Image: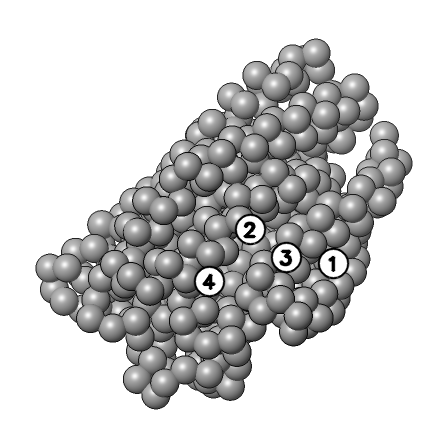
Amino acid sequence: MKHPSKISKKYLLKLSIPIFFANLAIPLVGLVDTGLMGHLSSTKYLVAVSISSSVISMVFWSFGFLRMGTVGLVAQAQGRGDYRDIVGTTLRNIILALFFALIIISLRDFIVSLIKTFFETSEDTQNLIRKYIFIRILSAPAELVMYVLIGLYLGLQKTFTSSLIVTFFSITNIIFSTFFVISLNLEVDGVAWGTVLSAYLTVFIFLTSTYFFIKKQFKIIPRVSRIIVTKKITKLFSINFDIFIRTLLLTFAFLWIPYQGAKLGEDYLAANSILIQFVMLASFFLDAYAFSTEGVIGYTIGRKTRKSFFLAVSNSFKLSFFTGLIISVVYLFFFKDIISTLTNIEYLRFLSFGFVFWIILIPPISSFCYQFDGIFIGASQTAELRNSMIISVTLFILFSIYLIDNLGNHGLWLSLLFFMAIRALTLNFYFPKILRKF
């Protein structure tokens, strides 16, 4: 770890660059899937993949605590020089990941029935959704274990390795999906199987390499007696449960967008599914700073170095906001080209153009809430993350109901902008609690 004076913008940027490229690969999967389906004969393929992939991704993201809970504990253990705790935390969360994955798979019929209840689509579209869900859900064990591995390397500030995991998964996903859809004409099945195969290939390779890394770096052979420690398991469950509630609410908030879009009509649902890709793309870039900051924040807390902590906080906010402004400028000049690439359906293109103002405005405003998330995760201050999200989602739903009634689809996007701002304001209110750790 660098001396406190070295936690500069340059140092944080160095940590973030690998995550930038890895995070760029993640939305590219969604963009490629959208593009593959958007060029088929009917909008039902695009709508089916948009809904089902969004739902299944949100289900998996609800277990993002497996990454976030790992990062803070690993980083703080590294700050204390407690390497056995690093290994123990990682193994406990891998076991939890496999347990939760089996639960997710067992609930596939329930997930499909929920989609049918909440999304008003045609019978053909519902059948395509069912096909996608039943295949894609098989990737749950691999994808959840990946969360833990990524959390481990982020906590150790080895952002290149964590990014390599994400990049490898995303690139192989694109290759498999494109081959299955274009060469084998598997349509919806193709994009689902592409994700499943790439997930298991990625986890096999990186679990193996992680085993040898731990053996060489820490010279530790894990033992059950070291893993099953009541006090540590209780703490892990407490942290994970808080993050689970927070992520579940965040998941609900983003599912609320296609739900309300479907009520406005399938055309709006399809247009919003294209526009939300811009929001996700921006978030993955901005999250790069949050991810890199998590490990630094946890380390400074473990080492009790207050000066390092404030340097990391200040510089990461500046970098994140400036990046948000750059993203907005890029969207301003290239939105037509990007949307036209995603779909060749003319009326869908023009409908999407009418709401571009919002995707240009969101990135710099949302940069603050993303960065606060990284700070609180690194500090393992998870109860505050949970409480902030409860307030933010509640107000988001109330705002959206009122604004949609008065402004239609513009009201939906305005409420999303409010949601980002409220998240930042509530976390700023809780920020002084982190300082009590020093």
- Residue at numbered disc 3: 414
28 horizontally vs 416: left or right: left
- Residue at numbered disc 2: 358
Residue 182: percent from the left, percent from the top? Answer: 15, 59
Element carrying mark 1? helix
Quarter of the image with the N terminus is top right
394 or 240: nearer the viewer: 394
Report, in whole angstroms, how far the alpha carbon at label 1 lies from the one at label 4. 21 Å
Of the image marks 1 and 4, the number of the one nearer the N terminus:
4
Residue 245: percent from the left, percent from the top? Answer: 69, 63
Which of discs 2 and 4 lies nearer the camera? The answer is 2
Which of discs 1 and 2 lies nearer the camera? The answer is 2
Q: Which mark is residue 319?
A: none
Quarter of the image with the C terminus is top right
Seen in the picture, residue 15 relative to 393 is either above or below; the reply is: above
Which of discs 1 and 4 lies nearer the camera? The answer is 4
Of the image marks 2 and 4, the number of the one nearer the N terminus:
4
134 or 368: nearer the viewer: 368
Q: Which mark is residue 392?
A: 1
Report, in whole angstroms, how far the alpha carbon at label 3 lies from the one at label 2. 7 Å
Disc 1 and disc 4 in contact, CB within 8 angstroms? no
Of the image marks 3 and 2, the number of the one nearer the N terminus:
2
171 or 122: nearer the viewer: 122
Residue depicted at 52% across the width and 38% down the height: 328
Of the image marks 1 and 2, the number of the one nearer the N terminus:
2
Disc 3 and disc 2 in contact, CB within 8 angstroms? yes
Say what amino acid the circle numbered 1 marks.
Ser
Say what amino acid the circle numbered 3 marks.
Leu
Which of discs 1 and 3 lies nearer the camera? The answer is 3
- Residue at numbered disc 4: 272
Disc 2 and disc 4 in contact, CB within 8 angstroms? no
